[in-house]
């Protein structure tokens, strides 16, 4: 009996469909594949298979829990993290608030934290909207993957494409005042700026200088398979965001303070802000929203909802006319 | 004009449907209760439930019960303040929409409790609205005396409530439940002043997926990250939380 006639007879009798063999073998391979592929690759969209082995640090060293920090981790950059594509990233944990110093420096650190978490009260005159720094840098500037201060501090001075020159750390903070807060920056030697720099410096205590720390910035997403679409994004918004930020995106205010910040309109960030770029907003939203459920949206949903949010009206870019 | 609106304006629909009158034949009662269902859906659909539920009928239900429904105050206290020792929650001052939603959840089983489930199932839609409206109209929690004496557990509870723990992706309770746990209507209930045992029970119910009625699974995502010690600390803190600026 040839294979073909056996196959046909089996198919006819229907006792045993040979297709099952294909399914069993295929299924087993699939499961094995899922288990074998390192977790980093599973979490992101599948990278081109050739890319991984050619990069240093692709030998699969895992993160050993509980080791002293800072510690070098060899990481396989996947396309999703290409912007931060350093083959080597360093793990770091900022000190706990209980360890905050006392004395004059301690006072500056505390004021810095107060300004960062309640900018509306402590740096009122520099702010032109209703946001607080912490709205986009969660956990008082500590949360990894929400552009934490401890990972930023040691990376400046640095050249920035945005203004085409080398920026000090103070100038980087000034950028968020001007665009994200739609205001004007405190002078570099002002009490507010000194406090914010002190707070950042203290959070970064013990971190290596000039080294990309794990958790810096917002983890950039791979290009979406479908072009980001505001109409799809509106649906994502209504299902996952309106509950807190309001159907009109204007946030929720209680007793004069925003519990849930406004995402567009006159009280939100302006057209020159990092968050007004779909790429940044998608990255932030995917890692951090809905609050407490980061990474629960698909990457496509994050792109779409970011497109929707960024297509809404907001204060203009103060640089007007000038390119990006 | 949308259909629900027309139905809502039918004669009698402004009043809560009275309990089944004895002289009516079964068919007529059926019609009336069906009408009650349609009307209550219509009210919800038009958002009119907020404006017109019968607060007085709610007060009567709370104090005397009726039609086989026990008086709510037997467990929830004379002024809806709850009973700390028994772990019965405070209802006074809680958001109207939130209370109504919880009664519906007890009735449909997405929130489980052997005491409340039968009570909720025996309430009509109109009675649920009346009770929710009544309790929402009572004064909310006010800080009772000085906050707790400082202790390690108190400090831990304060930190969880006001800052959370982002090393495990856990937001502060007050990020959603509002300043000092006052609540952010309509979706986020007040937590301040609830008995410790009650808050603990709720957090554990989410942790074990026994309570599943939270929007987007937001509350479950928080509870599943908490340890027993953290649940105890924050539940104790929330019995009498401090206002911003009172600490340190």
Image (spheres, rainbow, N blue to C red):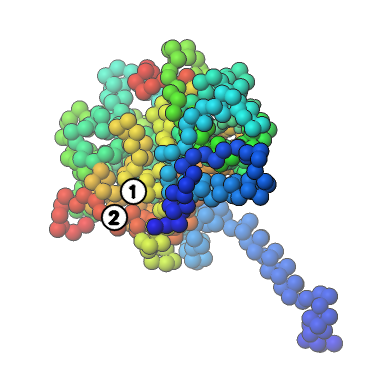
Residue B140 falls in image quadrant: top left
Q: Tell me if label 1 and label 2 are in contact, CB under 8 Å.
A: yes
Residue at image location 79% in from the left, 85% down from the top:
A8
Residue tagged 2: A312
> Which residue is located at x 40 percent, y 48 percent?
A242
Q: CA distance from mark 1 to mark 2?
A: 9 Å
The spot of residue A204 in percent (x, y) is 36, 34
At mark 1, the secondary structure is: loop
For label 1, count other residues whose C-alpha is less than 10 Å away and answer few (under 14), some (14-19) or many (20+): many
> Same subunit under labels 1 and 2?
yes
Task: Say which residue appears at 37% left-offset and 46% top-offset.
Answer: A246
Instruction: Tell me if B116 is positioned left or right of B170 in this view.
Output: right
Q: Could you tell me which residue is drawn at 48 percent across and 45 percent down?
A: B13
Mark 1 falls within which chain? A
- Identify the residue under disc 1: A249
């Amino acid at each position: 009996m040839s294979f073909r006639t056996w196959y046909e007879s089996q198919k006819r009798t229907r006792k045993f469909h040979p297709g099952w063999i294909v399914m069993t073998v295929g299924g087993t391979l699939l499961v094995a594949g899922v288990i074998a592929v390192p977790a980093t690759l599973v979490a992101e969209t599948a990278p081109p298979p050739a890319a991984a082995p050619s990069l240093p640090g692709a030998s699969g060293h895992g993160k050993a829990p509980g080791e002293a920090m800072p510690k070098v981790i060899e990481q396989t950059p996947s396309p999703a993290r290409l912007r931060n594509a350093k083959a080597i990233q360093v793990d770091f944990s900022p000190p706990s608030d209980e360890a905050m110093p006392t004395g004059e420096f301690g006072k500056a650190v505390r004021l810095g934290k107060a300004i960062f978490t309640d900018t509306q009260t402590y740096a009122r005159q520099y702010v032109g909207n209703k946001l607080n720094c912490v709205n986009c840098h969660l956990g008082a500037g500590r949360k990894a993957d929400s552009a934490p201060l401890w990972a930023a501090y040691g990376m400046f001075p640095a050249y920035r494409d945005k203004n085409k020159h080398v920026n000090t750390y103070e100038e980087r903070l000034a950028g968020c005042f001007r665009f994200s807060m739609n205001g004007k920056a405190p002078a570099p030697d002002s009490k507010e700026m000194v406090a914010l720099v002190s707070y950042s410096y203290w959070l970064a205590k013990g971190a290596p200088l000039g080294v990309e720390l794990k958790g810096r910035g917002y983890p950039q997403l791979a290009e979406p398979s479908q072009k980001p679409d505001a109409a799809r994004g509106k649906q994502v918004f209504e299902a996952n965001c309106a509950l807190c930020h309001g159907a009109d995106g204007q946030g929720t205010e209680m007793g004069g303070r925003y519990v849930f910040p406004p995402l567009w309109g006159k009280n939100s960030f302006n057209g020159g802000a990092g968050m007004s770029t779909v790429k940044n907003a998608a990255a932030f939203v995917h890692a951090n929203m809905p609050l407490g459920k980061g990474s629960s949206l698909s990457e496509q949903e994050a792109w779409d909802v970011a497109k929707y949010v960024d297509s809404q009206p907001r204060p203009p870019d103060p640089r007007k006319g000038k390119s990006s | 004009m949308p259909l629900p609106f027309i139905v809502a304006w039918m004669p009698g629909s402004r009043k809560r449907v009275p309990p089944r009158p004895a002289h009516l034949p079964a068919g007529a009662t059926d019609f009336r209760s069906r009408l009650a269902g349609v009307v209550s859906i219509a009210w919800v659909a038009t958002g009119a439930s907020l404006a017109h539920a019968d607060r007085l009928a709610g007060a009567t239900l709370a104090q005397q019960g009726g039609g086989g429904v026990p008086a709510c105050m037997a467990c929830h206290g004379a002024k809806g303040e709850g009973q700390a020792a028994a772990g019965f929650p405070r209802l006074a001052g809680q958001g109207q929409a939130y209370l109504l939603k919880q009664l519906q959840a007890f009735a449909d089983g997405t929130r489980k409790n052997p005491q409340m489930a039968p009570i909720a199932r025996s309430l009509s839609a109109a009675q649920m609205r009346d009770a929710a409206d009544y309790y929402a109209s009572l004064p909310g929690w006010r800080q009772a005396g000085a906050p707790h004496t400082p202790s390690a557990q108190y400090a831990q509870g304060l930190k969880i409530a006001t800052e959370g723990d982002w090393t495990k992706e856990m937001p502060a309770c007050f990020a959603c439940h509002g300043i000092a746990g006052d609540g952010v209507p309509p979706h986020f209930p007040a937590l301040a002043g609830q008995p410790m045992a009650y808050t603990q029970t709720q957090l554990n119910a989410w942790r074990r997926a026994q309570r599943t009625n939270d929007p987007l699974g937001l509350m479950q995502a928080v509870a599943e990250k908490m340890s027993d010690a953290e649940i105890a600390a924050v539940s104790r803190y929330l019995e009498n939380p401090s206002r911003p600026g009172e600490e340190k």
